[in-house]
């Protein structure tokens, strides 16, 4: 019989075709050959940097000119414009060089368009010495010398170690000059320094020739040694900011080029062209690849974030790549709310049209699963479908938001993030039960999220009497606690910065250890009941820096050092996190909510916010956060906005323009239903409930308190193991064991037999057609199509009570992708 | 084994009793009674409670951090991963003490406050009292006795005169534009010769005079290690180009001739030595292999492949029996020098070993490491001694023939230690991290080099700097120019001295005039008896003035001598001038004698005149002496000019000789 079912599942035309494969080939358009002539429809011209200061005789600044066409496309016209500069500076190629102290103006003209940048020149008689900190150290990053696979490895490479990505300049200076006293630098004959002969490939080097002997980088190394290999680690100014120009690029057609320039700002007020020292990267090489010198080349249609990394700073420019020569006519759909305005604006720039609005059937199933984690019942279906009120979708959303299952879904989500889980011999079930109840109660009673976070982070007391303290019971180490807080509430992964400066973000080891200092004074003791732990502020204990053992003062991430002398450090931090001015918290929570309903976050992954992982739609990202603050952190209001937007209610059917797009919300994303909800749905449609440990018969999987308890089904379908705070823990990727479990395992087959749905309905006098319809409505939220009805009818023929056949139909429906997915 | 131990213990007890007996004899019964009366500090009663309270958490029965457990007396004495931590009656060697007393890092207990003074005192007394276990325990025998029993033996003294370089080339292979470190340093064991290495060359200097003796080309790269043969007749220089070429070359010290070269490494040689009988040369480096070659035919005698990290130090024992090799991970091994068979694995160092040195009797090996310690080892692998010598890491350790040691390292100090590791004195603080410190042949001086390129010669007794050595000697052309400038300077000074002489002559003339005046006054006194007294007193005053002027003349003459380069003609002139002065003075004497007769009746006044004459004679004598000295100075200057001239001649000759080879080397030293 099973084989028959197997065949049947293929025979049925249930699976719709909208689990479509992403089309990989998009029309590349014509590649413009040779230099473009002066383009007619240029709307504006800009020169970057918009302000130039040259501060010594060796200083220089690369300049570019960018023309913007009427349709928003930008052109790198640096080589086409006519440059004019007189007096204090002169232009050599694309570089502006100092001539004499004074001020002048750099002018560019392109057709009828003009642009200019003021130029200030000072100190042309100064020729500063090579700086170890700012000239030599960046070379190791740019050359990849201090990468993890090379000398940046903790054991070094071939006997020589550098700090990973240069987090320890003083240590690197020591190892270069004095560790093996006379080996690596040769003060008397700089060219004979091993440092120089290795990087230029004059002697065998595992890493090969890193720089040409006559390159500017090799020369810098040579000159530094020649000047006595001095260190300025202690005295050098710090880099305060790095800018990347142009800030936004829209390239049209494969092969279009754009040169980027990076400018560093130092704490002593100086600026400097760091195009030769910065590391250029792109987060999407296939759309916009960038070479070592900052020249980006357009590839396939799409979006890339082009970045420059210098010192501990990473900055990026949004780069769009559009196909050349494609006509684009936006559909004139009126936006439902602010979400549609912002999503629509981005889509128009990308020349993408959204898919249409989904059917009422699709909407009802989608919104029910998303908001309350249940499939619509037959009655709900009938009521909704027969309702002729044009506002019925909004009404449905409101109705669902008031149900207790909404709170359970979000309690589950928070329980996953907060790792609510008993651990044998360490974390007892009872405090976890209380903790879970506390979380559910907070959401059910509508406690604003900011208040909930303040209650959680600042909590003190016993793990029975104040269950929120369990946050500090589950994770006991200071550093991990700090990392978890950053990841859960700020969406930032600090882990890297424990051992080295974050390679793709702004966080340094100083930031990391200053942040951990907020959690260095947590005291723990066992209460009278051994299962209870008391968390208290012991008002002593410091976080020390890994490299030099400094005691670090508590400092907010990227913000001030607060006064913590009078208060519990954690409470001070909680206030900062939940303050409306905090740039991370509200947007991060809002993005998590958004990702729940849209399948993908505006920033994705939602808990990996960093400079090099920007929002696909920054305006939307900011607006969602602002709205959450405006709503006083009321989750329901934000969900209402999202569910009422057209962006949420789109069909998953792609059109020609949006078929390759997954990040701009032009169509609905088809999503596997999460493990707990799926099992609940399976139980509900078959009428065969599960029994979970510690819960009454009929309780739902989303209500399981303890992450330590699981069933085979839940584990197989990717229930979060709650061992980390990562939002990636619940898995919805398909696996072979999932398919086999549904096909051959106990879940579907046994439940059909247990629930006796088919028998009951047939016994109640329903004919097979009605039974099939009921099965379809329960499971898929729609009636069977003509073809489906016809083919199913062929199965049971004229039998009056074809129990086995209808059970097979039921089985096939439950095994269909349409059941497993929310489309 | 246990029987033996007992025997040894007994021996120790006998010794201890013997010592106690001595003390009794020397210091009398009072002291003996006092010692008995003092409370015995023991592990069981006093020290263990302290350890239990402060240390057991990490160094106790459950966790043995760094393999150190203080839980029982036995484990405490065994020590931890880095060897023994306590030495009886020797605070400065006891690592445990240095850590709890916060003298070295890491300070213990970690992170927390120091132990209380009372507790520290207890531990101190316990160590000083011989590390007693229980009340009835015997003192542990202090280990330093092993070191104290040092008697220098056969010392590889050369037959005949020790080798001194003679007539070597003086033109450097290359004179680098910038100042750089001396890549290596060696001092002859029998002659006042130091060799300093720099890229492409070795410069030899006289450690007594600081004189530059010559240059040995090392055109394969930089000599990273140098050793004189044990008899001082040969210099071994090994090195090469990092990550490219490595070899060892042997030079004849006297002639500077390169005798042979062995090795063809893929990286520079970092450690090398030649056996005392000149039969074997060992080399090692970043390729982790020690290769030992036969000097006679350059063939490979054997390879040592046991090291797992860069070979950073090696040395043959003075008696030629053993070879000690050490690496960057702290491994130290002893081999049979003839066969390459392993003889010992000396475990203790935790970081790179930078330097090894055998004591003259081949019985003790000293090793220096980046782990801050110098350790002394017996041939059986026993560590005799370990002490923190240079904070941050020791770069070099060397035995003197007397058994003293000198070290230098990252704390920039050049330090002197006695055979037991006791600190004698610090000789100098260098400008940057110290690279090497070596005793001169007689042990009277220490040559020390630092990372900035300073090489200093220091008095062992006082630390006074007596000379500096330039690893980057100037070219002959530059030296010629500087000598020419020196000669010009002499000339100027000579002219100034000449002018001084003229002034002196003028002063002599003035004195003559004054004497004439005095004579006139005496004559007029004979004529005018009544005015005699007044006139005589006036003459007296004038004589006093002359005396003062003569003093001034003395001083001027002395100044002239100091400045004078000298020249014969001028001397003749001076002598002639002085002859005139002498004649005139004799005249004066005659006049005075004549005056004596004239003023016979006025005895008192005559005596005054006689006194003046005596003073004039004294002045004359001083002037004569001065002239004699001037004459000597002129002769010296003459000799120096001649010497310089001959040196210039020699240099010019060698310069011409070197022209061809120099061009070749300059090409080599100036890469594109």
Image: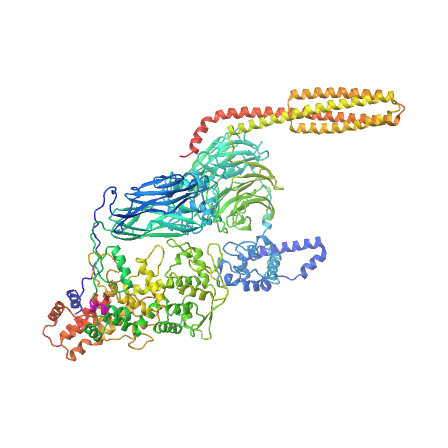
Q: Evaluate whether residue A456 shows in this view.
A: yes
Q: Residue A245 location, x and y as percent?
A: 34, 49
Q: Nearer the viewer, residue A142 or B598?
A: B598
Q: Nearer the viewer, residue A288 or A213?
A: A288
Q: Residue A544 location, x and y as percent?
A: 48, 58
Above/below status of A548 relative to A198: below
Question: Which colour assignment does the render follow?
Answer: rainbow
Mostly what secondary structure, the magenta segment? helix
Q: Nearer the viewer, residue A30 or B134?
A: A30
Q: Nearer the viewer, residue B276 or B510?
A: B510
The part of the chain drawn in magenta is A359-365
Q: Residue A534 location, x and y as percent?
A: 46, 71
Q: Residue B638 location, x and y as percent?
A: 62, 24
Magenta region includes residue A364:
yes
Q: Quadrant of the C terminus of chain B?
A: top left
Q: From the viewer's perspective, tell me whether residue A648 is left or right of residue A59.
A: left
Q: Evaluate whether residue A420 shows in this view.
A: no
Q: Residue furthest bottom?
A: A764
Q: From the viewer's perspective, tell me whether residue B600 is left or right of residue B204.
A: right
The residue under the point 23% across, 44% down is: A32
Above/below status of B628 relative to B153: above
């Amino acid at each position: 019989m099973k084989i028959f079912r197997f065949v049947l599942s293929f025979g049925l035309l249930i699976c719709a075709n909208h689990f479509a494969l992403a089309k990989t080939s998009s029309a590349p358009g014509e590649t413009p050959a040779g230099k473009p002539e002066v383009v007619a429809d240029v709307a504006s011209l800009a020169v970057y940097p918009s302000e130039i200061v040259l501060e010594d005789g060796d200083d220089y600044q690369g300049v570019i000119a960018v023309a913007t066409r009427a349709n928003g496309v930008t052109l790198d016209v640096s080589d086409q414009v006519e440059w004019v500069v007189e007096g204090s500076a002169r232009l050599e190629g694309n570089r502006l060089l100092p001539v004499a102290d004074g001020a002048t103006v750099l002018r560019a003209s392109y057709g009828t368009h003009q642009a200019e940048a003021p130029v200030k020149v000072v100190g042309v008689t100064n020729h500063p010495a090579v700086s170890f900190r700012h000239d030599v150290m960046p070379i190791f990053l740019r050359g990849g010398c201090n990468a993890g696979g090379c000398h940046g490895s903790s054991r070094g490479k071939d006997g020589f170690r550098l700090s990973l990505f240069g987090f320890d300049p003083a240590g690197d200076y020591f190892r270069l000059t004095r560790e093996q006293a006379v080996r690596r630098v040769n003060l008397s004959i700089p060219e004979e320094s091993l440092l120089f002969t290795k990087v230029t490939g004059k002697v065998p080097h595992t890493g090969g020739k890193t720089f040409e002997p006559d390159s500017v980088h090799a020369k810098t190394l040579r000159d530094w040694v020649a000047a006595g290999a001095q260190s300025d680690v202690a005295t050098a100014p710090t880099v305060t900011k790095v800018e990347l120009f142009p800030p936004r690029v829209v390239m049209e057609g494969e092969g279009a080029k754009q040169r980027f320039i990076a400018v560093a700002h130092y704490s002593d007020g100086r600026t400097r062209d760091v195009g030769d020292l910065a590391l250029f990267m792109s987060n999407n090489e296939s759309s916009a690849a960038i070479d070592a010198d900052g020249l980006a080349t357009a590839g396939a249609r799409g979006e890339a974030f082009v970045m420059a990394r210098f010192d501990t700073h990473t900055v990026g420019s949004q780069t769009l790549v559009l196909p050349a020569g494609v006509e684009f006519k936006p559909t004139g759909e009126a936006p439902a709310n602010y979400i549609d305005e912002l999503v629509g604006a981005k889509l128009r720039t990308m020349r993408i049209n959204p898919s249409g609005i989904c059917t009422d059937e699709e909407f009802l199933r989608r919104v029910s699963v998303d908001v309350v984690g249940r499939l619509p019942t037959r009655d709900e279906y009938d009521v909704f479908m027969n309702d002729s009120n044009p506002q019925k979708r909004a009404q449905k959303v409101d109705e669902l938001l008031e149900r207790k299952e909404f709170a359970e879904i979000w309690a589950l989500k928070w329980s996953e993030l907060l790792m609510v889980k008993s651990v044998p011999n360490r974390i007892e079930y009872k405090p976890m039960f209380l903790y879970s109840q506390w979380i559910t109660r907070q959401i059910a009673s509508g406690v604003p999220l900011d208040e909930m976070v303040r209650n959680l982070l600042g909590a003190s007391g016993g793990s029975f009497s104040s269950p929120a303290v369990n946050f500090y019971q589950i994770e006991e180490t200071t550093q991990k606690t700090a990392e978890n807080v950053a990841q859960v509430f700020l969406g930032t992964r600090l882990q890297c910065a424990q051992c080295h400066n974050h390679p793709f973000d702004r966080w340094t080891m100083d930031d990391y250890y200053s942040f951990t200092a907020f959690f260095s004074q947590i005291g723990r003791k066992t209460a009278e009941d051994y299962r209870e732990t008391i968390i208290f502020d012991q008002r002593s204990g410091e976080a020390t820096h890994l490299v030099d053992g400094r005691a670090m003062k508590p400092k907010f991430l990227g913000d001030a050092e607060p006064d913590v002398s009078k208060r519990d450090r954690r409470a001070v931090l909680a206030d900062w996190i939940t303050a409306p001015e905090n740039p991370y918290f509200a947007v991060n929570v809002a993005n998590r909510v958004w990702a729940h309903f849209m399948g993908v976050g505006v920033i994705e992954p939602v808990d990996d916010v960093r400079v090099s992982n920007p929002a696909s739609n920054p305006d939307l990202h900011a607006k969602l956060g602002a709205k959450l603050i405006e709503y006083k952190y009321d989750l329901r209001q934000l969900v209402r906005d999202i569910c009422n937007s057209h962006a949420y209610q789109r069909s998953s059917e792609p059109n020609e323009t949006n078929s390759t797009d997954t990040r701009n919300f032009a169509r609905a994303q088809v999503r596997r239903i999460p493990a707990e909800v799926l099992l609940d749905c399976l139980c509900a449609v078959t009428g065969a409930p599960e029994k979970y440990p510690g819960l009454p018969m009929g309780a739902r999987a989303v209500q399981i308190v303890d992450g330590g308890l699981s069933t085979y089904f839940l584990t197989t379908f990717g229930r979060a193991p709650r061992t980390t705070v990562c939002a990636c823990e619940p898995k919805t990727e398909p696996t072979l064991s999932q398919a086999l479990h549904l096909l051959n395992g106990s879940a579907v087959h046994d439940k059909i037999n247990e629930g006796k749905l088919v028998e009951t309905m047939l016994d109640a006098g329903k004919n097979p057609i009605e039974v099939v319809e009921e099965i379809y409505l329960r499971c898929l939220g729609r009636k069977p199509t003509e073809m489906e009805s016809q083919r199913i009818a062929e199965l049971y023929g004229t039998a009056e009570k074809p129990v086995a056949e209808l059970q097979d139909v039921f089985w096939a429906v439950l095994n269909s992708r349409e059941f497993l997915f929310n489309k | 084994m246990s029987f033996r131990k007992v025997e040894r213990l007994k021996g120790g007890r006998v010794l201890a009793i013997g010592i106690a007996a001595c003390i009794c004899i020397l210091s009398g019964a009072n002291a003996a009674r006092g010692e008995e009366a003092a409370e015995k500090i023991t592990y069981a009663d006093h020290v263990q409670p302290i350890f239990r309270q402060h240390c057991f958490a990490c160094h106790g029965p459950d966790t043995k951090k760094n393999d150190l457990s203080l839980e029982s007396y036995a484990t405490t004495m065994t020590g931890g991963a880095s060897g023994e931590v306590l030495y009886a009656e020797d605070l400065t060697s006891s690592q445990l003490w240095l850590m709890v007393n916060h003298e070295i890092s890491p300070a213990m207990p970690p992170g927390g406050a120091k132990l209380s003074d009372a507790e520290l005192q207890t531990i101190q007394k316990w160590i000083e009292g011989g590390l007693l276990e229980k009340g009835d325990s015997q003192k542990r025998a202090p280990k330093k006795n092993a070191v104290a029993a040092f008697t220098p033996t056969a010392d590889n003294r050369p037959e005949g005169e020790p080798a001194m370089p003679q007539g070597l080339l003086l033109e450097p292979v290359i004179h680098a534009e910038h100042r750089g470190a001396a890549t290596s340093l060696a001092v002859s064991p029998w002659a006042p010769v130091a060799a300093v290495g720099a890229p492409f060359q070795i410069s030899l200097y006289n450690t007594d005079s600081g004189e530059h003796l010559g240059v040995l080309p090392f055109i394969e790269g930089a000599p990273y290690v140098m050793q004189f043969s044990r008899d001082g007749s040969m210099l071994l220089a090994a090195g090469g180009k990092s990550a490219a070429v490595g070899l060892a070359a042997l030079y004849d010290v006297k002639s500077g001739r390169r005798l042979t070269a062995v090795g063809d490494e893929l990286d520079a040689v970092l450690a090398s030595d030649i056996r005392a009988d000149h039969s074997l040369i060992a080399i090692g480096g970043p390729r982790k292999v020690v290769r030992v070659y036969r000097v006679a035919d350059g063939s490979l005698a054997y390879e040592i492949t046991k090291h797992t990290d860069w070979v950073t130090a090696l040395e043959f024992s003075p008696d030629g029996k053993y070879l000690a090799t050490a690496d960057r991970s702290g491994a130290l091994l002893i081999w049979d020098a003839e066969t390459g068979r392993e003889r010992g694995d000396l475990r203790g160092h935790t970081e790179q070993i930078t330097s090894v040195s055998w004591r003259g009797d081949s019985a003790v090996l000293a090793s220096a490491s980046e782990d801050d310690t110098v350790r002394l080892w017996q041939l059986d692998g026993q560590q005799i001694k370990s002490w923190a010598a240079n904070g941050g890491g020791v770069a070099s350790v060397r035995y003197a023939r007397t058994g003293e040691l000198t070290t230098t390292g990252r704390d920039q100090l050049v330090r002197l230690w006695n055979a037991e590791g006791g600190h004698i004195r610090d000789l100098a603080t260098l400008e940057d991290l110290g690279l090497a410190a070596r005793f001169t042949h007689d042990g009277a001086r220490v040559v020390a080099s630092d990372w900035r390129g300073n090489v200093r010669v220091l008095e062992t007794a006082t630390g006074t700097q007596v000379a500096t050595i330039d690893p980057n000697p100037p070219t002959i052309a530059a030296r010629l120019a500087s000598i020419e400038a020196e000669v010009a300077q002499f000339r100027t000074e000579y002219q100034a001295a000449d002018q001084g002489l003229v002034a002196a002559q003028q002063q002599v003339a003035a004195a003559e005039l004054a004497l004439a005046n005095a004579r006139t006054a005496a004559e007029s006194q004979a004529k005018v008896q009544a005015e005699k007294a007044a006139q005589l007193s006036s003459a007296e005053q004038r004589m006093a003035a002359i005396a003062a002027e003569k003093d001034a003349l003395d001083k001027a003459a002395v100044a002239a001598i100091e400045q004078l380069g000298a020249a014969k003609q001028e001397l003749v002139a001076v002598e002639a001038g002085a002859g005139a002065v002498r004649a005139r003075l004799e005249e004066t004497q005659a006049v005075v004698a004549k005056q004596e007769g004239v003023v016979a009746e006025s005895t008192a006044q005559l005596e005054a005149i006689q006194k003046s004459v005596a003073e004039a004679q004294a002045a004359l004598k001083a002037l004569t002496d001065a002239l004699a000295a001037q004459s000597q100075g002129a002769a010296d200057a003459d000799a120096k000019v001649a010497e310089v001239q001959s040196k210039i001649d020699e240099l010019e000759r060698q310069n011409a000789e070197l022209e061809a080879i120099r061009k070749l080397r300059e090409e080599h030293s100036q890469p594109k």
